[in-house]
Image (cartoon, rainbow, N blue to C red):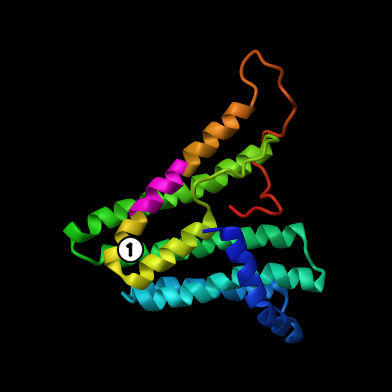
Amino acid sequence: MDFNQFKQDFRKGVRPIVLTCDRLGLSPLSVSILGLAITAVSGVIIARGSLFGGALVFLVGSGFDMLDGDLARLQGTVSRRGAFLDSCFDRLGEAFLFAGLTWYFAGLPQDVARLPLVLITATVVGSLTTSYVRARAEGVGETCIVGFLQRTERVILLTIGLLFGKWLLVPVLAFLAVATLGTTVQRIVHVAAKLPGPGEPQEDAPMDDPEVPAEESE
């Protein structure tokens, strides 16, 4: 599946909603905050045991992630600050989802919950390190857009797993755990191979923690 084409088709489909937001006087930041709030509600719903309902609400919240960027372009207010906040809100939205899942599985019998909780932890670690490796690579002057699995794919797979319940959610989590950690390793190897080693000419590059790239998708 071509996820870039999927996102383009989705943006065309929600164009009327973007225009409506503009007519209502909503700013891209307000749309981002609303999307984050909806995503937080989905985490609470999932934690209370309604995986299907939480998935539907999460889909609505995630949809706002595509609205704010298009709204900013429509209003001519695209900025590095907006891109930075949008990227941060994306991560917080995922965190709410995983927190809800953790709470849900923690309430189940230990023999049922143990494996899903391990998989959730592994997926969270993989998701965090996937983003960090890219940001750190750009901080030392290298690009890093490779990856088996990025945020859009994670969101789609998690939503499908939630919609179909535990029987599919656990295998999805297992796949995500392997794929996200694999993406981290893939990116580390990719960037390390491009950076000069000991005894090789060193290029000057910033060594402090990098800013989030303006167009960071993952």
| Front residue of 41 and 23 | 23
- Residue at point 31%, 74% (across, down): 49
Which quadrant of the view contains residue 6? bottom right
Q: Main secondary structure of the magenta part?
A: helix
- Name the amino acid type tagged 1: Leu
The residue tagged 1 is 169
Asked if the magenta segment contains residue 179, the reply would be yes
Q: Splitting the image into 4 quarters, where does residue 68 fall?
A: bottom right
- Residue drawn 38% across the image and 46% down it: 178
Q: Does residue 128 lie above or below 152 as drawn?
A: above
Is any atom of residue 32 visible in this view?
no
Q: Horizontally, is 153 left or right of 213 in the view?
A: left
Q: Is residue 178 magenta?
A: yes
* Image position of 2 with respect to 33: above or below: above
Query: Which residue is farthest right?
Result: 76
- The span shown in magenta is 174-182
- Residue 54 image offset from top left, x and y in percent: 41, 75
Decide which of 149, 32 is in the foreground and name it: 149
Q: Is residue 147 above or below residue 160?
A: above
Residue with the most extreme top position: 199
